[in-house]
Image (tube, rainbow, N blue to C red):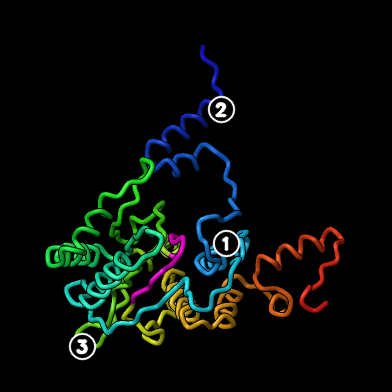
Amino acid sequence: MARWDSSDEEEELKTAAAVEKESLLDLAKVNFDSTHLLFHYRSQYEELINFSNHAFYEGKLYIAPNIEKNENYKPIERIKVNGVWKNRQNLEEANEVVKLVKNILMERKENETIEIITFNINQKDLIEDLLDEEARNDAVFEELYNKELYRRENEEDKSIFVKNIENAQGDERDIIIFSIGYAPDENGRLRFNFGDLPKEDGENKLNVTASRAKKKTYLITSIELEDLRVENSKNKGPKLLKEYLKYVGAISNGNENEAREILYALSGISSNSKSKCESLFDSIFEEEVSEKLESSSVIVENSLEL
């Protein structure tokens, strides 16, 4: 007679659960213990990852601070247009995306790669159509754009592409162009229907988009902060989108103090930590290093005050 073993039942349950999973990541969660990856290497500027770090990881990621301070360079840039939401599309934003792609391809200095992300598939299709139309009308742009469409380096795909926010997981490019798309309709009414964002765990889609860029993020929007009335939203996604738009605006305007306040509020850093970081450190990474050293009885002093 076969002897019943609880471990056999456990393995059968794992196998059954694995069959239902849609990705290798979900499958791994069934069979392996989880751990947190705390070191971030993608972004060359801390501004590109700071929002995700504080909104989703409690400020615990280890991020290398910017080596050089260039007041003329904005790692994040907000572009405001007066778009209208019609037929689930925003023509003004799509035209701005095409204009921006054209300028990047003609003026870039280091052959940067490009990805375009938007909130819904209709806006994605419109942007692709307008890029194709511009290529048909401009021979110079056509040559540059076609090279990007089929670009590969060391057998790795580096092509330009447009994706809606649900499909951007795992991608990274030097430059990310994020078209919000949603806008007031022809009657001036803004309907909050941002794809999966208002759903449970929908904020993870925003996390993906906000952390894809290596060198720069352009955010194209038709929305002002006061347009987003999300205080009564059931889930976190809409509220975090408003905070992200606020953060992008602060960085784009060069307001480091405002950006810092937004980040601290997101991760719940205390007012004591605020004053300490503002007085002694150029970045939160430096503050965390200081705290680790002090916990080992190493005295840390601000070299600028010596």
Q: Nearer the viewer, mark 1 or mark 2?
A: 1
> Mark 1: which amino acid?
Tyr
Question: In the rendered image, which residue does mark 1 sit on?
Answer: 57
Q: Residue furthest top?
A: 1
**In the image, which disc is placed on residue 133?**
none
> Mark 2: which amino acid?
Ser
Question: In the rendered image, which residue does mark 3 sit on?
Answer: 187
Label 1, secondary structure: give it.
loop
Label 2, secondary structure: give it.
helix
Residue shown at 25% from the left, 53% from the top: 147
* Stretch of the chain drawn in magenta: 210-220
Name the one closer to the observer, 251 or 85: 251
Residue shown at 69% from the left, 79% from the top: 278
* Residue 2 percent location from the top left of the image: 51, 14
- In this image, 91 relative to 269: left or right? left
Name the one closer to the observer, 279 or 236: 279
Whole-angstrom CA distance, mark 3 to mark 2, is 62 Å
* Nearer-N-terminus badge (3/2): 2
- In this image, 300 relative to 9: left or right? right
* Residue 261 percent location from the top left of the image: 59, 80
Residue shown at 48% from the left, 74% from the top: 73
Whole-angstrom CA distance, mark 1 to mark 2, is 35 Å
- In this image, 79 relative to 31: left or right? left
Residue shown at 50% from the left, 56% from the top: 42
> Mark 3: which amino acid?
Asn
